[in-house]
Amino acid sequence: MKINLPELCLVVLVGTSGSGKSTFGKKHFFSTQVISSDYCRGLVSDDENSLEATSDAFEVLHFIAGKRLQAGKLTVIDATNVQAHARKSLIELARKHHVLAACIVLDLPASISQERNKHREDRNFGPHVIRNQQSQLRQSLRFLKDEGFRYVYVLKTQEDVDAVEIGYQPLWNNRKFDHGPFDIIGDVHGCFDELQELLEKLGYSIKTKQNTADSTTHKKYEVVPPDGRRALFLGDLVDRGPKSPDVLKLVMSMVESGAALCVPGNHDIKLMRKLRGRDVKITHGLKETLEQLEHESEEFKRSIDVFMDKLIGHYVLDDGKLVVAHAGMKEEFQGRSSGRIRDFALYGETTGETDEYGLPVRYNWAGEYRGKAMVVYGHTPVPEAEWTNKTICIDTGCVFGGKLTALKYPEKELFSVPAKKVYYEPAKPFLPVAGETDSSAPEQVSEKRSSYDLLDINDVSGKRIINTELLKKITIKEEYSAAALEVMSRFAVDPRWIVYLPPTMSPTETTREPNLLEHPLEAFEYYKKNGIQTVMCQEKHMGSRAVVIVCQNENAAKTAFGIENEGQGICYTRTGRRFFNDLELERKFIAHIAARLEHADFWKEFDTDFVVLDCELMPWSAKAQELLRDQYAAVGASADAALNMVLPVVSMGAKRHPELLELEEKFAMRKVCSDKFRQAYAKYCWNVESMDDLRLAPFHILATSKNVHTDKSHQWHMDAISKFVKDDKILMATNYKNVDLTDETSVRDAIDWWFKLTESGGEGMVVKPENFVARAANSLLQPAVKCRGKEYLRIIYGPEYTLDENLKRLKARGVGAKRSLALREFALGVEALNLFVKKEPLYRVHECVFGVLALESEPVDPRL
Amino acid sequence: MSIYPGVPGGKLQLLLTISTTHNPATDLGFLLYKNPSAVHTFDMSFGKLYVFYPEATEEKCTVAILLDVDPVGLIRNRKTQSFDGPQLDQYVNDRPYVSSSFMSVALNTAFRTAFSGKSKERQELADKAIDFEVSIPCIACRGGEKILRDLFEPLGYEVTTENIELDPNFANWGRSRYYSLNLKSKCKLSQLLAHLYVLIPVLDDNKHYWVGEDEIEKLLRVGKDWLSKHPHKDLITKRYLRHRKRLANIASEALAKLNEEEAQDPDVVEEKHLAEEAVLEEKISLNQARINKVVDVLKELHVTNVIDLGCGEGKLLKVFWELKELRKIVGMDVSHRSLDNAEERLHLEYAPEAKKDRIKLIHGSLTYKDNRLSGFDAATCIEVVEHLDASRLTAFERVIFEYAKPKHVILTTPNVEYNVKFEGMPAGKLRHKDHRFEWTRNEFQEWCHQVANRNGYSVRFEPIGEVDETVGPPTQMGIFSK
């Protein structure tokens, strides 16, 4: 006997004790697929036959089965299930998870069960037990279908049982094998002319059969799609518009010839019900359709019924990467089937509440969507198709005077044709009317607001594991996420701006050179031993790291970042905090950069309307004022004051006690250190009275509209940047030097350069591999290694770090933890940029930058 | 927090000198049990201690206590004794090593016997008040010159002090929190030592120094003759013992590190500013008025479960918890540290089960939507919105009014118009440094009306605190209802 089961279902085995259910289960299913009540009894009581444990055992059984079904795993229940109430709870479980229930009954003669139980020592119950079970089973048989089992198989003899073969059939909605490409078309509503125009624009050739047998039927059109493509209709073909029958004929022809797929819309289904003579209200444009159909043949009308009847509520396509349905599909419903799911596909879902007009409030499933599949849907007219969390509604209200829109998949490009006229007046204004307040157009507003991405706490909290293209499985510990949540919530700018946070940077390994902690040689060695031949040394500016986003204009800020009325850009720190408290200063600053970009023809050259720049902003005191005052200056002041008094006292003491001479010398040395310390930080401070006192040195062009520029060389970045920073009072270029690591002169040159930079008060330099992303064998290399100057390090390691006794001990430092951290942060930052440019949902971008911030809480020696 | 741990630079106490002009001045050596003709050295865990006499004549004798603190050794040595594990030590701040307590420890180490007031050779002199002069070149003082004087003058000292400039190269950076200090007094040496021992760390007010139970005993012992009579004894005791602070958990430590770049120690800043706001508003006991009003409104609305958004350290929760009609109370805050403090403040750990079941603290944010915030009769949002950037108010609105959707939202915020009534508050300044804005009554009401309209709520307003005819109440309250 062949038993056919859906690929995903809940299989309920029914049979008396000893009827061979467990044997059957073992033979036909994986052991992990079968959950047996006896086993669950054992789990909770150590006794597989304990009747007392029954209730707990079934709780466990339901729990496990529920988890499996939730995960989309076929599940088999091995319990007697001879009583209706036992089966009922299982049917409910299947329904809850939107899977079909199947039932396989082992209705063997009682004698077989009795005989088997006799041979089992643990089954010492009397024959009446089996008799009772048998009679309950028999009574149940004819009700199984009504109870809700879609598939019922009854096996009457041992021969039947032995001959069973189980086959699986995919669900109707499973078209994962179908990879497209598709042209997905939103609600047509009888707008035939626009549909024809749109299809032709997309490259479909449409021939109309005149005066043949087919010309009055659903075979009226012959459509040839462009190379390998197919149309995919999202339903609501009919109602309201002028030519519903023609739309039907066109779409039906296309579906029949394989040129199109189609899912049903609520209007289509309503029309079908009407054609079948059901009592439906002739509202919402059905009247127009019925009038238009009056002139059509009965045969055509029948074919509509047949066509509609076959339509599948939603499709899962292209290996699960694409889901289409008329009204959308939330993640947990995708690829499942139940009445409720079909309803969701047709009508969407409401929250159970009503708005002030008494209309049901739509459940904003798209705003909460976190699934991996792209969902394309229609149903609710929107002025513009916009992405929200990998979902897009492409019903752009053609029939209401909007436009008819198609989405090319996988290209994700939108095409549309404007409506030739307003065919039908919407109940509520559909297109935004100037000056209209929110409350008078609730539906439109709620749609608009749902397209504004609001993050969920679950997008960031708890332990997280993030896979990036550069690095797999980056773990963010729970406590660090918690710390980042506070920083993000209290101090960070609007998360839609934060498309990148810069990684921390490791210093060189401690140098072998005496009297120094860091030296370029170690940085060069690191890259050389990892197979890098050319590195670029860049002067390290001593200011604050800044991410600067500049848009061509405010409108670009809206389209690219979704941000309105917040100017044409922003400048934020490495923790996502706004750089300037003075918003007017920020506005001027951004406008200045925008003007420079414009002047250099940047927008055109990069075919973009925004740019994300990685920069250093000077002076250091512009942002770190409080840090400087409370820490650096405070250290300087107290050291100075103390030493000024200590020295004379020690000198006096030394006159009386020669053994104090050494101490006198030491404190004199400390005074020198303390003075140098004050000089060291003073170099990086100046007063900022206006924008002209600021200096910005961009060193990476991170992203523009269509590209993340991490695939380029640093030379490319330097060249591209020099074009717009040249001869500017605020923007400045970064000095750099390319070094051939195999050439000793070149290396010597670079080292000399470093000494010159640092001796004249520079912080030091950053050594970067030739290309932005560098690998050795399979591992990612440090994107940059910093090499700081001797004097600068005083403000890191303290005024007296250069004293022999101190330096000796400080040299025992390890950069391993810092480097690991730098790589993880780098990978997350680049991932965020990539996701952003690919227009992935905000929550995915945010997860990465949030990860960078969280990782910053990892305890690493902050002096590195 | 020091940017280079282990260099307790800013607070480094290098030197203290004690002079006397009692004749013969060299008797000081007998009192201190330290021979003026020798250099005395002690090895301390944090460096080396030198005691020597830069001058020792019949007319004047000065003893110098010089600490040669080993800045690098501090952090390296501690590694082995730390109970937090080595990781934390990589960036521990300078607080555990503050100089002021070093100096106290140094005094105690060097002059143990002198502390007791005993002198083998000169007991008479030890029991007698003689002239002393103490010099400290640099001392950190929280509270400024006034505190210096308040602490020492009642004990009979003549105080000379000077505030040290932060950096002569940057005059506009202002003054530092450091002072040079010179004290003159006629007293017993043991008294002098006791005063210095207790008051030096009190000046610095370092609250991150771990102080165990035995410190209380020590304070009582050293201060027994004078502390109870000191007009500022409460301040002294509080500062001396408040040092006791729960070891912050890893996350909050890490957070402090993060914020370092933004140049503020959130803990200190927060406390400072909270204090400022509290002082401002204290005279009108606004906080109590707010709490009372919120409770009245909850009762009036027959609320049985409530969520306090931005509960901070749980002041309001504590009051809610005593109201039997509130069956379910949730406090949410974005700061883990605040929640820890709230837990402690509420004594949650020791509450009876039935009472404990009614309350819950959760870590969350007002700008991320969150299922845990749904299903409440009322949400209170007391003095919270003004801590959000104006550009984040839309997110806040959606999280609370569109998603959490409590039946009622009770929201309070300062009325900026009232600020003119606060004495000594400069025009244009906000009540708290972290306030991103403060609204006029019009601005607040307009915003509330918009929020209510957009989300299907009605809203009414109530004043909190005494209402001034022209500028209105100090705090304004909006009560939203669905």
Image (cartoon, coloured by chain):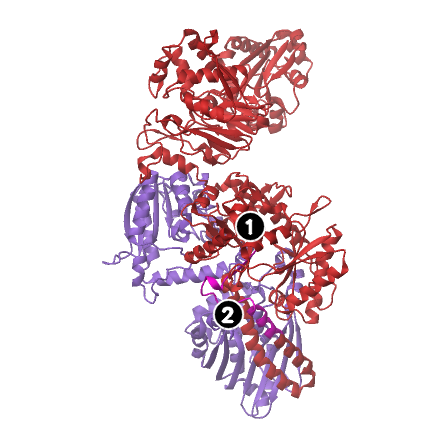
Chain colours: A red, B purple
- In the rendered image, the vertical position of residue B474 relative to residue A671, given as above or below: above
Q: Are marks 1 and 2 in contact (CB under 8 Å)?
A: no
Q: Please check the rendered image and state whether residue B335 is part of the magenta-colored stretch, yes or no.
A: no
Identify the mark at residue A501; answer none if there is no mark: 1
Q: Is residue A696 magenta?
A: yes
Of residue B100 and residue A860, the one placed in the foreground of this image is A860
- Residue A425's spot in the image, x, y percent? 32, 26
| Residue annotated with mark 2 | B204
Tell which tag, 1 or 2, sits nearer the viewer. Answer: 1
- Answer yes or no: are tags 1 and 2 on the same subunit: no
Amino acid carrying label 1: it is Leu
Residue found at the far left of this picture:
B469
Using the image as rendered, state which of residue A419 and residue B401 is in the foreground.
A419
Under circle 1, the secondary element is loop
Chain ID of residue with mark 1? A
Q: Using the image as rendered, state which of residue B155 and residue A198 is in the foreground.
A: A198
